Amino acid sequence: MVHAQPGDDVKHILRPLDRYVLTEFAKIFAVTALGFPILLIVIDLTDHVQGYLERHLSTRDIALSYLFWIPDSMFMVMPKGLPVSLTPAGALPRSAILWSGPIRRTRRE
């Protein structure tokens, strides 16, 4: 009698191709979710650095204001970032396995 291991049923929920697509989506989504707000902060900081210097704000105050601004920037950017992560323009086209069907070779005699 074969006893099932605790993680065996979890491995069979997702097929290898499903796992691959899900991990590739998660990677692209994570880069998008982190990259867009950082890019937005860098752009905003370069636009407003002159005003910060004129008001003699400390680096700590500027960093703290951008830290509290991250949730708002995520709210602004994520509707644009989600479609980017859903497009297969990321890492998926690198794999020829996804686009080629099964190769059937028959032996002719």
Image (tube, helix red, strand yellow):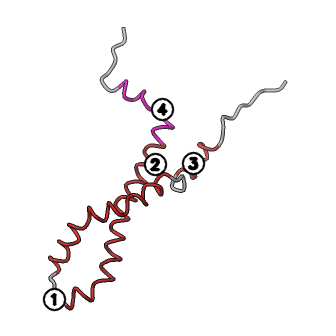
What amino acid type is highlighted by mark number 2? Glu
Circle number at residue 15: 4
Q: CA distance from mark 1 to mark 3?
A: 53 Å
Give neighbour class at mark 3: few <14, some 14-19, many 20+ (Cα, 10 Å).
few
Return the x and y of residue 107 as percentages of the image width and height.
78, 26
Mark 1 nearby-residue class (10 Å; few <14, some 14–19, many ≥20): few
Whether residues under marks 1 and 3 lie with C-beta atoms below 8 angstroms apart, the answer is no
Disc 3: which residue: 95
Q: Give residue 49's position: percent from left, percent from top.
A: 27, 85
- Measure how far apart labels 2 and 3 are at the Cα level: 11 Å
Q: Was residue 65 drawn as part of the magenta stretch in this picture?
A: no
Any mark on residue 86, and which?
none
| Amino acid on which the number 3 mark rests in the picture | Ser
> How would you rate the neighbour count of disc 4 (Cα within 10 Å): few for under 14, some for 14-19, many for 20 or more?
few
In the rendered image, the residue lying farthest to the bottom is: 54
Looking at the image, residue 32 lies above or below residue 21: below
Q: Which residue does the numbered mark 1 point to in the structure image?
A: 56
Q: Earlier in the sequence, mark 1 or mark 4?
A: 4
Quadrant of residue 13 within the rendered picture: top left
Quarter of the image with the C terminus is top right
According to the image, label 2 marks what residue? 24
In the displayed structure image, the side of residue 87 where residue 78 appears, left or right: left
Residues rendered magenta in the picture:
8-20
Report whether 95 appears left or right of 68.
right
Calculate the distance from the C-alpha at mark 2 to the C-alpha at mark 1.
Answer: 45 Å
Q: CA distance from mark 2 to mark 4?
A: 14 Å
Q: Secondary structure at mark 1?
A: loop
| Image quadrant containing the N terminus | top left
